[in-house]
Amino acid sequence: MEIHIVQAGETLYSIAGQYGLDPALLEELNGTPEDGALAVGQTLVIRRPATFHTVQPGQTLAGIARQYGLTLRQLYRRNYNLGGSPNIRPGQALVIVYQDQPAAATHTNGYAYPFISRQLLSAQLPYMSHLTPFTYGIDASGGLLPLADEMLLSEANRLGTSPLMHLSTLTETDNFSSERAVQILTNPALQDTLIQQIIATITAKGYQGLDVDFEYIPGDQREAYAAFIRRLRESLSPMGLPVIVALAPKTYAQQPGLLYEAHDYALLGAAADFVLLMTYEWGYTAGPPMAVAPLPNVRQVLDYAVTEIPREKIYLGIPNYGYDWPLPFVQGQTRARSISNQEAVALAVRYRADIQFDQTAQAPWFDYTAPDGVPHVVWFEDARSMSAKLGLIGEYGLYGAGYWNLMRPYPQGWTVLDAWYEVEDAV
């Protein structure tokens, strides 16, 4: 894999010619618009196919995969434009193998809300070992709030992605509740009822594990939270199902703040089968403009985490979005708009902004002035920032990557993942 940085005057066709690629393939690999519009400073991922297959009349995608010793999921990953659909036509060209095959394998997990479009979900599922529909919350009586997850589970089953049930303290008002967390953690009888409902849901819907995300827990519930996770693991382990717990991005044990204090890395790492480090949201809606996941910050969390938790238990959190801040930033007043990485590039194209790259944060950004005269700054993810994060998985010997989230289209991100790693199917 090579990463090309668009220069002034370059076009999709001129760049494709420079690398000896079909412009249509370059467009597919990067999700560029059909009109070919590019921004100066934009990244384009270059991958050279080693083997193509031209579809013949009567052939099926499954048959072509068998012909070359591939799984359907592998064939989908090498051809994002298939969109997870088996429908093909005679004369269609499929990439069978790229020259730059990944040297390592990893596991992936992606989160999605029930309202994700089926088309977008299906295109991304082949890149995911697991899909985690977000979320089963907890009601006022300590029971499960329902989730309309039928479509997500159906597509995950069709495309061979293992679904994980997601449990959080999200309430009927879509807010994380400290009170609901304490209610469950301090009442063993409510825990019994909740665990029974979790097992019933997992059994009825075919979930293959549980992902737990209790946030904003009072610090005095630190041991109780770990004990609850341990109870969940003891309940699901006989069924052969893992328990994952999400951890706030801490850099030392006694880090203060409601988000951090009850997330004891050592206790929770021992209680769960796996953990997800939520290594994102340094740049966030209500905060000052900065990268969502600056690489030095991510490294600091990892450097601490591996002293408390076995590396092979850790999913690295990876953001699939950016933010657009109006300026000047005023604490308590300014709110950034969450945008997709593709939308960020489209904004740079629209306002003819040159995309910059912060070498320290390992993240792209640009500024522009809106038609109303308000200046803006945008931080997002591109092929360089994604590569920097994915490289940490191999460098630290981690279990895999957890993507928050799958709601925004980003073909280039999956191209980068496929170049870095062979995605393992769930065991």
Image (cartoon, rainbow, N blue to C red):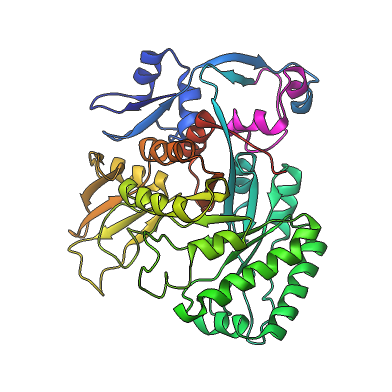
Which span of residues is magenta-colored? 64-92
User: Quarter of the image containing the C terminus?
Assistant: top right
User: Quarter of the image containing the N terminus?
Assistant: top left
The answer to whether residue 63 is left or right of residue 11 is right
Report the residue at 42% width, 50% height from top.
302
* Image x and y of residue 63, in percent: 79, 23
Quarter of the image for residue 285 reads bottom left
Of residues 305 and 52, the one drawn nearer to the viewer in this rendering: 305
* Image x and y of residue 363, in percent: 31, 43
**379 up-or-down from 352: above or below:** below
**104 up-or-down from 358: above or below:** above
Quarter of the image for residue 373 reads bottom left
The answer to whether residue 99 of the structure is visible from this angle is yes
The answer to whether residue 170 of the structure is visible from this angle is no
Report the residue at 69% width, 68% height from top.
232
Q: Magenta stretch: residue 211 in it?
A: no
Report the residue at 61% width, 41% height from top.
123
